[in-house]
Image (cartoon, helix red, strand yellow):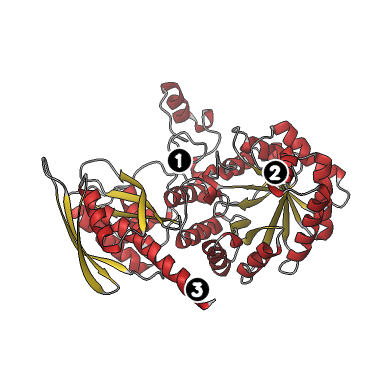
Amino acid sequence: MKRVFIFETTLRDGEQSPGVNISINDKLMIAKQLEKLNVDIIEAGFPVASQGSYDAVKLISEQVKKPVICGLARTLFKDIDAAGSALKNAERSRIHIFVATSKVHMDYKLKKTEDEIKEMARTGVKYAKKFTDDIEFSPEDASRSNIDFMCKVIEEAVSAGATTINIPDTVGYAQPEEYGNRIKYVLEKIPNIKGVNISVHCHDDLGLSVANSLAGIKNGATQVEGTINGIGERAGNTALEEVIMAIKTRKEYYDAFTEINTKELFATSQLISRLTGMQIQKNKAIIGKNAFSHESGIHQHGVISNKDTYEILSKEDVGWVGDNIVIGKLSGKHALTLVLKGSGLEMDDRMINILMEKVKSLSDKEKEVEKEDIIALALDMLHNLSDQEDIIRLDEFSVITGNRITPSSTVGLMIDGTKKIGTGIGVGPVDAASNAIKALIGDSITLKEYNLRAITGGTNALANVAIKVEDKEKNIFVSEAVDEDVIMASVKAIIKAANKAIYFDRKKNKNGESG
């Protein structure tokens, strides 16, 4: 059987999902969980794209040692320099270089001839070899490229030193049979392809990304790229959990295996869902809430008699957990640790003790503390762990609201160590509190999106507030906060986002002054 390598790109391609912006600390948390999952390659970012992306790749390279850490780059030398620099402390590094080969991309995006594209592929790969011997090359929009021209570009990249060739279905255009044939054609027609890994990277615009990826594997590909939960721009990427379990369940059919620790799939899925804010549909294959649920009487009878009647894989194989765990003030650290582990979260003993006190405080208020409450509290704590300086701190606030009264708020903030008090009115208490904060920090940021959800049911449910703010230069900052009080959770989230924006602005200005 051939080994299929798993190339996980949540931190690069997955972050391109509309509305997703993952903080550097959350990226490290995800990367460490992907290491537990035992993925082979983590594409940690596109280092030249922004300082934040560069810093994330650098941090992950330094702290996550088992997988290969990969950075994306165009064939431009400045891109490759950024990737090489960000990856220099990695135990094992890879630079992933791409250039488009479809006519529509060459004519309208790059405005380059075929000869120029071949030269870009050759020189880009050759230059990247200065930094690492592990080079992946992608002819972007491969499924809409002239196949013979695409093969000529690949031949140039391999001659220059590419060790993995990826065939991306960039816009989700391909059909399984034709995509499989394209992989087969590459392996048969390119004279120097022997010994080079062939990778598949498919998008889900027509709902065929998993089918196309599996067709590629069936026809000789030895690496599959995608994201857990299938997140990504537009309709998303290949859902890796589906590909992984298809190979495991039908290993004789594919004559293949992976080294993935499948028991970490559910925890990884849950962590990525929470940190990206992208909910998982209940009927999602492998990791959805209903994936192992049976309501039909006929199905229930069959499963009770023998699970094989209606279940082709076991929930234990993917670490699936479908029931809420209720924890009260008499529960211990072991139960908390179990809940955290099942959700891909890690805390040291000191933090678990603090979390335990929060849980007990919640249960003292006659709140039934469930798994989701614990995870929300833990994430709130982990999000507060940052080297970023808290320029703004909440000292006090009050709101007045009611029937036939204009909601108003008074907020006291410590800004750079000095207490300032502001007031505001609004259409509701949250709006009033937001305007009071804005009166103190000015109009440098604008609230663009506000989302409120109850963690669990009931009027005493924990409130989770997630917001996005925008500064004057159109930079987006996201934050979230959890509290028993909706208005307090909102105020905390707004202050967190304001701190991010101000910290970013000061750091940028400082760097500008020094260079």
- Marks 1 and 2, how far apart in space? 36 Å
> Amino acid type of disc 2?
Tyr
- Marks 2 and 3, how far apart in space? 36 Å
Location of residue 187 (image quadrant): top right
**In front: label 1 or label 2:** 2
Residue 308 appears in the rendering: yes
Give the labeled residue for mark 3. Answer: 511
Residue 108, disc: 2
Q: What is the secondary structure assignment of the residue under circle 2?
A: helix
Quick one: which residue is furthest to the top in this view? 298
Query: Looking at this view, is 512 or 36 the one in front?
Result: 512
> Amino acid type of disc 3?
Asn
Q: Mark 1, residues whose alpha carbon is within 10 Å: few (<14), some, or many (≥20)?
A: some
Q: What is the secondary structure assignment of the residue under circle 1?
A: loop
Give the labeled residue for mark 1. Answer: 280
N-terminal-most mark, 3 or 1? 1
